[in-house]
Image: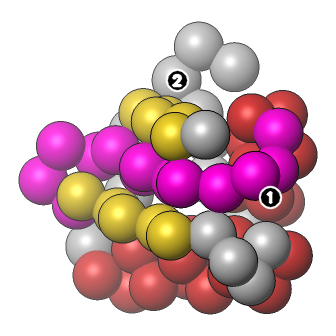
């Protein structure tokens, strides 16, 4: 399943790396793509959308509309 999230407080590559590392720590099989310019996180994973959102939030980021 592919999950796309709008994360408005992504500032740069450090944020992208932190989000990627947080998701891969919990979901090692996930494929993560963070686009700093559009502030989107795309995750291809077997995990639920809810669990991915919780991981991103616990890394200190907000999700638009969540």
Question: What is the distance, in whole Å, between disc 2 and disc 1 at their CAs?
Answer: 15 Å
Residue 37 location in percent, x, y?
A: 12, 53
* Magenta region, main secondary structure: loop
Depth check, mark 2 against mark 1: the one in front is: 1
Start-end of magenta stretch: 36-48
Q: Is residue 9 at least partly visible in the picture? A: no
Quadrant, the C terminus: top right
In the displayed structure, 28 sits above or below 66; it is below
Q: Residues within 10 Å of mark 1 (few under 14, many from 20)?
A: some
Quadrant, the N terminus: top right
Q: Secondary structure at mark 1?
A: helix
In the displayed structure, 49 sits above or below 19; it is above
Count of marks, rendered view: 2
Numbered circle sitting on residue 64: 2
**Which residue sits at x=42%, y=49%?**
42
State yes or no: residue 46 in magenta.
yes
Q: Residue 20's image quarter?
A: bottom right
Q: Secondary structure at mark 2?
A: loop
Question: If you read the primary sequence from the N terminus, does the residue marked by circle 2 or circle 1 appear first?
Answer: 1
State yes or no: residue 63 in magenta.
no
From the image, tell me which residue sits under label 1: 55
Discs 2, 1 touching: Cβ within 8 Å: no
Residue 63 location in percent, x, y?
A: 59, 34
Q: Is residue 29 at least partly visible in the picture? A: yes
Q: Residue furthest top?
A: 65
């Amino acid at each position: 399943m592919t999950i796309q999230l709008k994360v408005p407080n992504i500032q740069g590559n450090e944020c992208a790396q932190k989000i990627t590392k947080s998701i891969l720590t919990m979901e090692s099989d996930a494929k993560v793509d963070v686009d700093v310019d559009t502030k989107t996180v795309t995750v291809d994973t077997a995990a639920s959308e809810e669990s991915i959102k919780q991981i991103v939030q616990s890394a200190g980021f907000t999700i638009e509309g969540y």
